[in-house]
Structure formats: structure tokens, C-alpha cells
Image (tube, coloured by chain):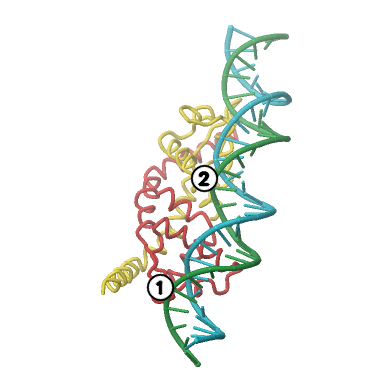
Chain colours: A yellow, B red, C green, D cyan
Amino acid sequence: MDEVFKALADASRRSLLDRLHARNGQTLNELCEGLAMTRQAVTKHLAILEEANLVTTFKHGREKLHYLNPVPIHQIGERWIKKFERGKLAALGELKRQLEKRDE
Amino acid sequence: MDEVFKALADASRRSLLDRLHARNGQTLNELCEGLAMTRQAVTKHLAILEEANLVTTFKHGREKLHYLNPVPIHQIGERWIKKFERGKLAALGELKRQLEKRDE
DNA sequence: TTGACATGCAACCATTTGGTTGCCTATTAT
DNA sequence: ATAATAGGCAACCAAATGGTTGCATGTCAA
């Protein structure tokens, strides 16, 4: 779980996921196109995404194809975000109450 | 948005949010209790959470009270996680197809 | 078979991060 | 008034991060 959060903490990596979400199964070179980064930097980002299981790769000849794995993102939603969804209104209420108290 | 992801990338900070989720409005010292960290380290983490608007604070005498702001977490769910929810099944299908192709 | 192409590996670098220690300030309680 | 309590500030440090360059390897096409 920690690896997933860490992987998602970088805007470049999130944009790589966006690109794969737009078109799945891209090669490394395709994913590099238009990015202000060297291929090696992208490789490192993809390795981190792969480590976090957000991306799975397959070798096809000399190409490496990258596929999005949506499961960890889904789990963050289920196991983490939803926990804070419960009690959200209560928390907002307490916040509002404190803001009003401040103005007394 | 980037600040929120970055803030959530650290396990200590997520556990601070957990603690506030369990009991809202705690002081700095309360939040420090039982943590294997100096008070100053916790202060820094809370500053990052505050910067990302995940926590809002109020001064009450010499104490600083910390309140959870659930809005940014909710937004990550709405604006980010849900985007990948759409197309999740398609992505899983492609993944499965590639895994099977590999065994040919 | 040889050159071009796709990717991998490793060393290196600057900056950021997560933590520390030491000291200062402000508020409360005795 | 003064001591104890709650928190703030700043300098410092080691390790992690995000990036680079240079070179090596594996695969495809002419």
C-alpha cells in the first residue's frame, strides 16, 4: 500500500498512468514521446510503477509493452478513501464549528 | 492536487490522519504520544498536511488543535480514482489477454 | 551479416526529505 | 513572580529521489 501511495506521489508517474489509461499497451519509446525527460528517467518511473504493481509489462521481441493494472488504484479507493468518507460530514461539522468559535 | 498526493505518500502522515479520524481536534502533544519520533518531526509532518489542506489548525491558548479536513481526500476519490474506475474492466481484460498470450 | 533500433545497466549529481538537537517564546498554574 | 507546559524556529545531517550521461545488449530488417 505504501509503495502505491509513493508511486502516485509524483506528477510524472501519474501522467504516465494517464497515458496508459488513454491507450493501454504502449512501448517505452511511445511513453517517452513529448516528455521533457530522458528515456532513462522514464524507465525509472515505470520501474517504480511496476514495483507498486500499477503497471505490468510484457516483452514482445525487442519492445516492452506496458499495461495498466487498475487493481491497486481501486484498492486505495476501497480501503483508504472510503474510510474517510465515513465521518466526513462529522469532521466538516467540527471544522465549521471551530471556524465560528474563532469569530466570537 | 500534487501537494495532497505528496502529503499522503508518507506512512507517518497517513497515520496522523488516521489518528485525527479516530479523534478529531487533538493537540500537537497528543498527536505525538506513542510515536517513535520527536515532537519537531511531528510538527513538520503536520505542517505538510496543513499545507496540503488536509488538516486545519486553531490556536486555543497555548495549545494548537488539529482538525481533519476531509475535502481533499474526497476530491482525490472523485477526480482521480473514479477516472480509473471507468475502463477498469477493459484494462483488466487486456491484462488477462496478454498473460494468456504469453503462455502460447 | 551488419547497421539501426529498443531497451538495459551503472555511475554520478543536485535537491528534497525526514529526521535530529538546541534554544527561544508564549501561556498557564502555583 | 516564577516554574512548568505547549509550541515555534533554525541549523544541521544522512539517506532517498529524480534526473543525467555513457556504454552495453538484444532484436529486427536490408
Labels 1 and 2 positioned on one and the same chain: no
Q: Is residue B45 visible?
A: no
Instruction: Write down the quadrant of residue A47 in the picture.
Output: top right
Task: Give the residue at mark 1.
Answer: B25
Q: Residue at x 43, y 58 (%)?
A: A78
Question: In the rendered picture of this protein, how many numbered marks are placed on residues?
Answer: 2
Instruction: Write down the quadrant of residue A19 in the picture.
Output: top left
Instruction: Write down the quadrant of residue A81 in the picture.
Output: bottom left
* SS at mark 2 in the image: loop
Q: From the viewer's perspective, is residue C1 above or below residue C28?
A: above
Inspect the image, locate mark 2, and give the three-letter code of the amino acid beneath it: Leu
The one nearer the camera, C29 or B100, is C29
Report the Cα–Cα distance between label 1 and label 2: 35 Å
Q: From the viewer's perspective, is residue A58 above or below residue C28?
A: above
Task: Give the residue at mark 2.
Answer: A54
* SS at mark 1 in the image: loop
The one nearer the camera, A31 or B45, is B45
Report x, y in % for residue A6.
53, 50
User: What quarter of the picture does the C terminus of chain A occupy?
Assistant: bottom left
